Image (cartoon, rainbow, N blue to C red):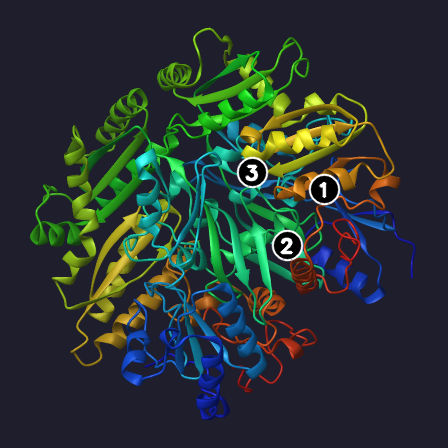
């Protein structure tokens, strides 16, 4: 066998198919990378060779009136967002930028990477995650088969929805070569309300009540005092987007419905509001801290219970904050060899949900389960799904599970 | 009859008495339907063109009973066809003569309404509309609203990834559910999701949604509920051409407006509706567009004006704006009566369900007219204009020799036309048996093989709802090793069922 360069830039699907067929024949797995902005995410499982989509770039279809855009997997997100901006449109799933968390350059991520991790942001409740916006894709499976699924239209139930499977599969099922996305109009303007000085329980209850109003709030975060620069007390934050006339009306309605007149309020106008939610999206309140970072998804009403249990059980919590009205919890801990996984997982398992270890040293992520373990029947089913795409385990071997 | 279903296995049919005896040990007598006259009630779903008498019908009441049935099916190698309320328009619940029809209608309880987390846990046999009714006192509703919502069940909605008229803004079923409990062939139970968001590993919740009963039997669904918009107002717009109507729809979206609903009807449907039950639609137009805007009062009032201006600029000759809830409902009444109204023109119709890129509508409608003329049949059109989902209604008379076959062929040609302009075979009705043999129009054999490998991961013996979705069904055991080149199967003349 000839020596290979450690990173192979694929030019098209046929390239990838050939490389993966060879990999399967010789049991030589590949890492899959775009810009490499999320290389710290997932189990630490090195491979001798890497397939990169960074040369596979370009928007191949954009029809603003049809709300649809297709791009090759290596296209930088920022290029797509700039193009959409020219038609006052956006990717409504507001993909997180991991630059802050991994202390790496920002705005380098590719669209393929955003899909592969099912990226999302503060608009998750109202607009969904990447999974809710992927209409179709082209990819190469671990068998070296060039496949497609879905299409370019909004409403499509033709065949199994494999788009859902590749979203959040971390490259372990197929190498994405091109994706087709639903895009949406960008709101005319936005504002945010910061309701200040309430305790955590009251703040979180307020966010849940806001989520049950008809006022189409698009962000529900709670940051404990000192977590956001310039905000030294607890803040429950609500974002309102839309036409100016509507934003003002809904802001006033929210205040009248949810907030006692004596409560301290901060009203962030457009630019400040954008900065605030970019910071929440990128988990900056915990990213700024040193230590290990966890991301928890739970039912919103269980958020405080989980954090209280962790505190009571002595987890060395440096920092935390909540998004998705409590449904998403970001936590930073003092480092430990087990990343406090038993404590974190027990707290989540008691109420239902999942916990992902987002930031820890390679040595820790080599032996701690980064993704939440599944019950036996479900784990076996996931394994069979993996094998249906990549029976020789040549795609991102070990990145999600030791067994994959 | 052109549809070929898997040949009933004589060995299974011969063991019918034994299968029933085993089922009697699992189920109380009230949950087992054995007599032929009673089984006839289940011989088709809402796709009535093809029928088959199921081997036996079971109506379990507990998850343990479902597990028992699926264990038995695995052990005795019997096929299972899951069924919700039987409202599928694509034959997804069409029975098999050598298969157990597994009806989930008795799973009809709402288990838990959790306003704090904006969700409800319900059993799969609960009607779609019953969920909204159960939460409406607190101002909530369940968003996806297929037109069969008074009858269809939420389990069937998940199996088909059901849509409705509000999809563009509020999404399909897949965007509105949080969790599922599923029993796999062999009896294992898996819980996918819950009251939290997204998956810890592969998104099997998303995969199950729209899998048409081929992967598992759903025994519980957790749905998201939303607070109803404060206000909804409608515009009724008439256009001198289909092109002008289509341009208006595009311009609304290009202006950054995502309406709660945006529907279009052609002249034939408008006239049928006005004859059926007059609701004030203009008769001197080629197309009408109904635009519903919802949200807060200030926003809706503002947007109504914007949309009216866009419509006038695009040449609308009629523009009525609802000023009361009664008037809004009146604008919708004609659209909601469209199917029965069209039925007055001819005794039968075949409802197709392609989706196309919206901008291609004028050429697709023109192409459809040509095809209809070729087959000497009439076609009326209703169109979920916002999301490009087209429902051509092919009018025929089943009493007339050859009409059914021509209607079916015309339907196939219309769907081929949809695919040729970048669209898909089905937007919300599912593939089922109806569009099964057209899958090759959209997918290569390699694409279809990959989907079937996923099927094998859930159901290696291919016992769950076989004969649906896939034109050829592989045996999983040989499938993993089979070499497929250039989309050609080895031994192409071997039967694959």
Both labels 3 and 2 in a single chain: yes
Chain name for mark 3: A
Mark 2 sits on what residue? A139
Along the line of sight, the residue nearer the viewer: A361 or B58: B58
Front-most of A145 and A104?
A: A104
Location of residue B423 with respect to B458 vertically, above or below:
above
Chain letter of the residue carrying label 2 = A
Q: What is the x, y in percent for residue A96?
A: 64, 31
Answer with mark 1 or mark 2, whichever residue precedes in sequence: 2
Viewer-side residue, A372 vs A250: A372
Height in image: B100 above or below A189?
below
Residue under disc 3 on the same chain as residue under disc 1: yes
Please name the residue that numbered disc 1 is placed on.
A345
Q: Quadrant of residue A298?
A: top right
Q: Nearer the viewer, mark 3 or mark 2?
A: 3
Answer whether residue B354 is visible to the viewer in this image: yes
Which badge, 3 or 1, comes first in the chain's sequence?
Answer: 3
Instruction: Tell me if mark 3 has few (under 14), some (14-19) or many (20+) residues whose alpha carbon lies within 10 angstroms of its own.
Output: many
Percent across and percent down for residue B8 are 45, 86
The residue that disc 3 covers is A299
SS state under label 2: strand
In the rendered image, residue A362, in percent from the top left (x then y), is placed at: 86, 39
Q: Secondary structure at mark 3?
A: loop
* Image: A108 above or below B497: above
């Amino acid at each position: 066998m000839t020596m290979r360069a450690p990173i192979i830039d694929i030019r098209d699907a046929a390239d990838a198919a050939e490389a993966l067929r060879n990999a399967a024949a010789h049991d030589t797995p590949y890492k899959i990378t775009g810009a490499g902005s999320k290389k710290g995410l997932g189990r630490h499982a090195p491979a001798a060779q890497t397939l990169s989509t960074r040369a596979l770039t370009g928007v191949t279809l954009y029809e603003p009136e049809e709300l649809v855009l297709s791009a090759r997997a290596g296209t930088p997100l920022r290029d797509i967002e700039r193009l959409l901006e020219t038609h006052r449109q956006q990717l409504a799933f507001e993909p997180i930028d991991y630059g802050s968390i991994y202390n790496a350059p920002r705005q380098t991520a590719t669209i393929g990477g955003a899909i592969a991790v099912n990226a999302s942001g503060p608009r998750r409740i109202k607009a969904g995650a990447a999974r809710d916006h992927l209409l179709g894709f082209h990819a190469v499976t671990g068998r070296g088969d060039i496949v497609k699924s879905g299409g370019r239209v909004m409403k499509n139930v033709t065949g199994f929805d494999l788009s859902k499977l590749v979203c959040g599969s971390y490259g372990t099922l197929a190498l994405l070569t091109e994706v087709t996305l639903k895009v949406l109009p960008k709101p005319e303007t936005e504002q945010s309300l910061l309701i200040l000085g309430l305790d955590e329980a009251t703040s979180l209850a307020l966010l849940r009540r806001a989520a049950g109003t008809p006022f189409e709030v698009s962000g529900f975060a709670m940051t404990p005092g000192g977590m956001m620069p310039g905000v030294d007390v607890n803040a429950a934050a609500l974002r309102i987007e839309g036409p100016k006339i509507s934003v003002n009306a809904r802001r006033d309605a929210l205040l009248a419905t949810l907030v006692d007149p004596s409560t301290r309020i901060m009203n962030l106008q457009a630019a400040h509001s954008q900065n605030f939610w970019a910071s929440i999206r990128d988990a900056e309140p915990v990213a700024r801290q040193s230590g290990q970072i966890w991301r928890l998804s739970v039912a919103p009403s269980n958020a405080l219970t989980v954090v209280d249990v962790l505190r009571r059980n002595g987890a060395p919590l440096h920092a935390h904050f909540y998004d998705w009205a409590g449904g998403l919890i970001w936590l930073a801990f003092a480092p430990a060899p087990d990343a406090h996984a038993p404590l974190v997982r027990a707290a989540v398992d008691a109420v239902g949900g999942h916990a992902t270890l987002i930031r820890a040293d390679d040595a820790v992520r080599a032996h701690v389960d980064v993704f939440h373990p599944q019950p036996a029947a479900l784990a076996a089913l996931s394994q069979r799904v993996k094998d249906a795409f990549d029976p020789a385990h040549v795609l991102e071997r070990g990145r999600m599970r030791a067994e994959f | 009859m052109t549809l070929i279903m898997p040949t009933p296995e004589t060995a299974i049919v011969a063991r019918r008495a034994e299968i029933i005896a085993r089922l009697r040990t699992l189920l109380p007598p009230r949950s087992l339907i054995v007599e032929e006259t009673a089984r006839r009630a289940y011989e088709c779903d809402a796709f009535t063109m093809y029928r088959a008498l199921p081997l036996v019908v079971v109506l379990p009441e507990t998850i343990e009973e479902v597990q028992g049935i699926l264990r038995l099916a695995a052990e005795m190698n019997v096929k299972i066809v899951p069924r919700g309320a039987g409202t599928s328009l694509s034959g997804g619940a069409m029975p098999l003569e050598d298969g157990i029809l597994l009806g989930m209608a008795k799973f009809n309880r709402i288990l838990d309404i959790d306003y704090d987390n904006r969700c409800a846990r319900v059993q799969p046999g609960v009607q779609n509309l019953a969920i909204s009714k159960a939460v409406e006192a607190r101002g909530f509703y369940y968003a996806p609203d297929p037109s069969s919502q008074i009858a269809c069940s939420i389990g069937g909605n998940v199996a088909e990834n059901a849509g409705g008229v509000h999809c563009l803004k509020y999404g399909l079923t897949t965007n509105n559910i949080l969790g599922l409990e599923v029993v796999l062939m062999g009896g294992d139970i898996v819980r996918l999701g819950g009251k939290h968001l997204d998956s810890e590993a592969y998104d099997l919740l998303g995969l199950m949604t729209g899998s048409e009963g081929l992967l598992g039997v759903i025994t519980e669904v957790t749905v998201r509920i939303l607070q109803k918009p404060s206000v909804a107002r409608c515009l009724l717009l008439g256009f001198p051409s289909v092109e002008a109507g289509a341009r208006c729809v595009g311009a609304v979206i290009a202006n950054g407006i995502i309406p709660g609903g945006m529907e279009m009807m052609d002249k034939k449907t408008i006239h049928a509706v006005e004859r059926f039950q007059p609701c004030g639609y203009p008769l001197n137009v080629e197309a009408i567009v109904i635009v519903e805007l919802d949200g807060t009062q200030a926003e809706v009032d503002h947007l109504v004006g914007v949309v009216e201006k866009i419509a006038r600029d695009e040449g609308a000759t009629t523009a009525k704006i609802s000023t009361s809830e009664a008037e809004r409902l009146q604008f919708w009444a004609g659209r909601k009566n469209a199917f029965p109204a069209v039925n007055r023109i001819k005794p039968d119709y075949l409802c197709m369900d392609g989706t196309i890129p919206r901008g291609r509508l004028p050429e697709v409608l023109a192409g459809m007219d040509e095809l209809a003329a070729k087959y000497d049949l009439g076609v009326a059109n209703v169109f979920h204009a916002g999301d490009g989902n087209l429902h051509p209604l092919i009018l025929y008379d089943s009493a007339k020799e050859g009409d059914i076959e021509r209607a079916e062929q015309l339907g196939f040609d219309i769907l081929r036309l949809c695919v040729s302009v970048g669209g898909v075979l089905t937007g919300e009705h599912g593939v089922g048996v109806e569009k099964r043999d057209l899958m090759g129009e959209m997918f290569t054999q390699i694409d279809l093989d990959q989907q079937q490998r996923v099927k094998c991961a859930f159901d290696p013996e291919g016992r769950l709802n076989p004969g649906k979705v896939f034109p050829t069904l592989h045996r999983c055991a040989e499938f993993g090793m089979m070499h497929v080149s250039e989309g050609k199967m080895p031994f192409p003349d071997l039967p694959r069922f």
